[in-house]
């Protein structure tokens, strides 16, 4: 197949008539026949996909390397299809040999206890992905934190489930993803106390710098469960912004503060939502909402007087 090169002139005759032959890779002029280059460099990746019937597929494929895979996706895997390079089925004796090779190949990839530990932990992290509903960058961060803990031998003598859950919670805190410790504990089926203990260990030993959780980000999560209008959400965000300016939100639970601001906004806009409904959606108690509500309401009253 011959393609015309746009906006390119021949070096000999100066005319815009350069062609490229995709089969031979030559680039030449259609007027005078001058050959500019004999080979063209392929700009795509080097891997290819293969069809099941034995033919090659020109489409590029292959997953990139990732920290969420125990070998980062760089290991080789023997094809599970019992066919040779030409697509013909293998003989019975060769099939048993290839099956045995597959078994030893999978065993050789995790022959050390550290590799087996990492494979089990990342497998549990992959299960938590759908339960907690987090993005890929949070998963990468959680896998990175767990690998660092494994290098410092912090996992030895501790539960793998608790450590991977603590790594996931630390990744959520670092990326400012609104997930509470209770959410991670319920998804991992591990006690909250154990995850908190492992999180404190990771925070101290790995010297993690965690940003303060923004309570404004929790508004959307609570309101989506209760189907609250956009007007009510915006007023709750405004209340929290005023509280942050007055430094009244320092040292308070972000989820409880967001739930209280949302309840104050519902009362202000005449939306019939009870404290129990907001408390269940936010995962806090009604007492917390009442206490924070009193403080926010006092601030609103003071602001109106001023």
Image (cartoon, helix red, strand yellow):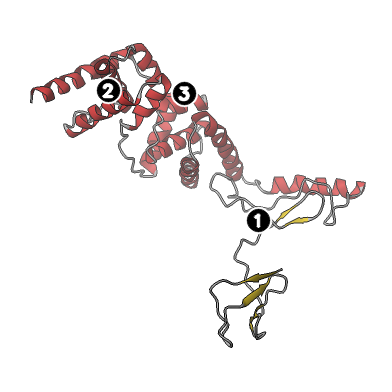
At 41% from the left and 30% from the top, the residue drawn is 179
| Element class at badge 1 | loop
Marks 1 and 3: in contact by CB < 8 Å? no
Circle 1 residue: 60
Other residues around mark 2 within 10 Å, as few (<14) / some (14–19) / many (≥20) = many
Q: Is residue 255 left or right of residue 82?
A: left
Circle 2 residue: 261
Eyeballing the image, is 1 above or below 227?
below
Marks 2 and 3: in contact by CB < 8 Å? no
Circle 3 residue: 191
- Choose the circle earlier in sequence order: 3 or 1: 1
Report the quarter where the C terminus lies.
top left
Eyeballing the image, is 98 above or below 292?
below
Eyeballing the image, is 48 above or below 232?
below
- Choose the circle earlier in sequence order: 3 or 2: 3
Residue 274, given in percent of the width and then of the height, sits at 33, 11
């Amino acid at each position: 197949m011959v393609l015309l090169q746009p906006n390119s002139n021949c070096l000999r005759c100066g005319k815009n008539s350069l062609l490229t032959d995709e089969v031979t890779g030559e680039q030449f002029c259609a007027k005078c026949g001058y050959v500019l280059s004999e080979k063209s460099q392929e700009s795509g990746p080097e891997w290819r996909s293969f069809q099941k019937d034995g033919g090659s597929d020109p489409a590029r494929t292959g997953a990139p390397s990732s920290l969420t895979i125990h070998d980062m996706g760089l290991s080789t895997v023997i094809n599970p299809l019992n066919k040779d390079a030409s697509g013909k089925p293998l003989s019975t004796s060769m099939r048993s040999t290839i099956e045995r090779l597959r078994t030893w190949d999978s065993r050789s990839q995790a022959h050390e206890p550290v590799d087996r530990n990492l494979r089990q932990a990342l497998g549990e992290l992959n299960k938590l992905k759908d339960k907690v509903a987090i993005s890929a960058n949070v998963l990468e961060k959680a896998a990175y934190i767990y690998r660092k803990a494994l290098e410092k031998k912090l996992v030895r003598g501790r539960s793998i489930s608790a450590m991977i859950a603590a790594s996931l919670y630390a990744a959520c805190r670092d990326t400012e993803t609104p997930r509470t410790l209770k959410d991670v504990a319920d998804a991992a089926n591990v006690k909250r106390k154990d995850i908190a203990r492992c999180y404190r260990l990771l925070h101290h030993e790995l010297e993690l710098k965690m940003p303060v959780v923004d309570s404004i980000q929790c508004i959307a999560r609570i309101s989506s469960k209760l189907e609250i209008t956009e007007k009510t959400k915006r007023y709750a965000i405004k209340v929290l912004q005023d509280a942050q300016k007055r430094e009244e939100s320092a040292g308070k639970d972000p989820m409880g503060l967001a739930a209280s601001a949302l309840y104050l906004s519902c009362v202000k806009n005449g939306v019939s939502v009870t404290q129990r409904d907001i408390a269940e959606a936010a995962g806090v108690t009604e007492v917390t909402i009442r206490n924070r509500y009193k403080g926010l309401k006092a601030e609103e009253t003071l602001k109106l007087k001023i």
